[in-house]
Amino acid sequence: MPLILPDWNPRAVLEPLRLPWLDAAGLELAVLRLDALDPLVSGNKWFKLAPWLARAGRDGAEGLISLGGAHSNHLHALAAAGARFGFPTVGLLRGEPQDTPTAQDLRRFGMALHWLGYGGYRARHQANFWEPWLQRYPGYQPVPEGGGGLTGAQGCAALVAMIREQLPALGWGDYHSLWTAVGTGTTLAGLVLGEAGAHPVIGALAVPVDHGVPAQVSGILAEAGCTDAGYRLVDASRGGFARLDAELARFLLDCERDGGVGLEPLYTAKALLAIRDEARAGRIPSGSRLVLLHTGGLQGRRALHDELLRLAGYTDQAVEAQG
Ligand SMILES: *Cc1c(COP(=O)(O)O)cnc(C)c1O
C-alpha cells in the first residue's frame, strides 16, 4: 500500500537565549528551536528528510529505507516520522548489533533494523548497494545517509523564512549572522540557499577541517546554480568528531542550567562554544545579534550523560540542585 503523505509543516520557534557569557560579550542570541518541534519528530534531520518524504509520496513508494549509526539522529527522525504518520521504515545500521537508547527507540517506532557490520556498511557508496535491499523491500524509497544532497538542503532553506517571520516578535529588526553546527554541510548549504546573500552564514564544524565539507557545500550550491558567496566555516570540532573534553562538558552543563535549554555535546554545544570562543577572540563585535539553529540531536545525548558528568567533575545531584 503506497504511503500517505503527511500534511505536516511544523514551525520551529525562534526564542532568545540569555547566558552570562553572552551578556558579558554584549551579544544577543536567538535560537531556532528545531529540537522542540514535536514530541516524536525533531531536529534538522526532519527538515532534511521532509523533501525525501514528499518525493516518496509523489512516487507512490511503499516505505522508506536509510542508513546510519547506532546513535543516528537521522534514523531516529525517520523512524519517528514513520511512527507518527504510519508508514513503514527500514534502517540499515553500521557495525554489530548494539542495544543503545537510539536502537531501542527505533525498534519501538516499528523500524525494521538490519546491522551491516563495518565492512558491509562501507559498501554503501557502491553503485549496486541498494539492489538487494530493494528486492527485499520492493517499492521503498532509499534515502542517502543523513538525508544529504541538494534534496535535503532544500528542506533546510525554508528555515530562513521561518526565522525572518519571527523577528518582529523578538523585537529585532534584523540580525547580523546565522550560525549552525556542521557535519556534512547539507544544512549549512540549505541556509546559504535560503539567505541568498542576505546575511552571512557561519558553520561551526563538528568534524575536522579536512573532512571535505567545503567541497560538499560547493557541490550542493553548484547543483542549485548558486555561487559559494556568503558563508564561512569555523573549527568547532575540538580535536575530532564526537571528541569530548572537560571544558566542553562544563560549558554544556552550565549553559543548560543558565539558559534552560537542552544541548548535546557533538553538535549544538560545540557550536555554542565556538560562538563564545569567536566572541572572546574579538571576531564578533559587541552589539551583534546572532541567530543559531538548535539542530536537535538530544536523543543521542542519553548515551553520553554519565560521561559528561564525569568529564565535568559534576554529580547528578549538583546539576539538579543548580537547575
Ligand atoms: C546531523 C546533525 C548536524 C549536522 O547536519 P549536516 O546537515 O550534516 O551538516 C548538526 N546538528 C545535529 C544535532 C545533527 O544531528
Image (cartoon, rainbow, N blue to C red):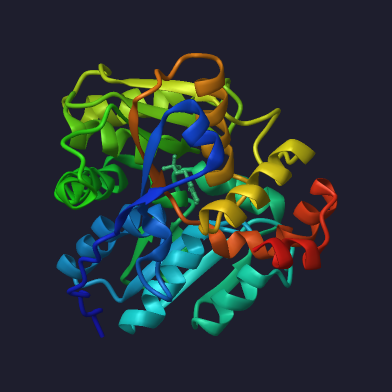
Q: Nearer the viewer, residue 67 or 313?
A: 313
Identity of the residue drawn at 74% across and 37% down: 247
Quadrant (top left/top right/bottom left/bottom right) for the N terminus: bottom left
Identity of the residue drawn at 22% across and 75% down: 6
Q: Position of residue 282 (x, y in %)?
A: 50, 14
Residue 174 placement: quadrant:
top left
Q: Position of residue 81 (x, y in %)?
A: 37, 73
Q: Is residue 273 above or below residue 36?
A: above
Q: Position of residue 181 (x, y in %)?
A: 47, 38
Residue 42 placement: quadrant:
bottom left
Quadrant (top left/top right/bottom left/bottom right) for the C terminus: bottom right
Q: Nearer the viewer, residue 121 or 46?
A: 46
Q: Position of residue 32 (x, y in %)?
A: 34, 50
304 left or right of 166?
Answer: right
Q: Is residue 144 visible?
A: no
Identity of the residue drawn at 72% across and 45% down: 249
